[in-house]
Image (cartoon, rainbow, N blue to C red):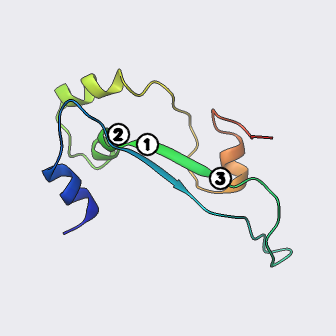
Amino acid sequence: TTLISELKAKRNPNHEYIFVLTGDHTTPISTGDHTFEPVCFTITSFSALLKELGDLDEESVKKREEIVALSDEVKLFNEISAAGGCLGRFP
């Protein structure tokens, strides 16, 4: 079993799982050591993930899109791309 199959089995239509993926520090290749640069992160809902995988019916997609209104066009998970996302760069 995978995490996705486990969550699908336990899914409740009145609740939504939210995933946050991040690192604990940056380690640029140029220094090879930890730095104090911002750490990129991404946030998504379980429904958005299922939609991307083609595993969510259209009625559920419409209902869930009302919940998740914040999105951007970032397609890569790295510091430079993340800085251009809708949340920008945190000081």
Secondary structure category for the residue under label 2: helix
Residue 62 versus residue 90 in the image, above or below: above
Q: Position of residue 29 (x, y in %)?
A: 78, 74
Q: Position of residue 19 (x, y in %)?
A: 42, 48
User: Does the residue at mark 1 contact the one at mark 2 (Cβ under 8 Å)?
Assistant: yes
- Amino acid type at circle 3 is Cys
Q: Residue at x 13, y 52 (%)?
A: 9
Q: Residue at x 18, y 50 (%)?
A: 8
Q: Position of residue 72 (x, y in %)?
A: 56, 34
Callout 1: few (<14), some (14-19), or many (20+) C-alpha neighbours within 10 Å?
Answer: some
Q: Residue at x 45, y 24 (%)?
A: 69
User: Does the residue at mark 3 contact the one at mark 1 (Cβ under 8 Å)?
Assistant: no
> Where is the C terminus found, in terms of image quarters?
top right
- Amino acid type at circle 1 is Thr
Disc ID at residue 44 = 1
Q: How many marks?
A: 3
Q: Name which quarter of the figure residue 14 lies in.
A: top left
Callout 2: few (<14), some (14-19), or many (20+) C-alpha neighbours within 10 Å?
Answer: some
> Where is the N terminus found, in terms of image quarters?
bottom left
Can you identify the residue that label 2 sits on? 48
Along the horizontal axis of the image, is 24 left or right of 5?
right
Q: Earlier in the sequence, mark 3 or mark 2?
A: 3
- Amino acid type at circle 2 is Ala
Disc ID at residue 40 = 3
Q: Position of residue 3 (x, y in %)?
A: 27, 62
Callout 3: few (<14), some (14-19), or many (20+) C-alpha neighbours within 10 Å?
Answer: many
Secondary structure category for the residue under label 3: loop
Given the current orientation, which residue lies at the most extreme bottom position? 32
Q: Residue at x 20, y 46 (%)?
A: 55
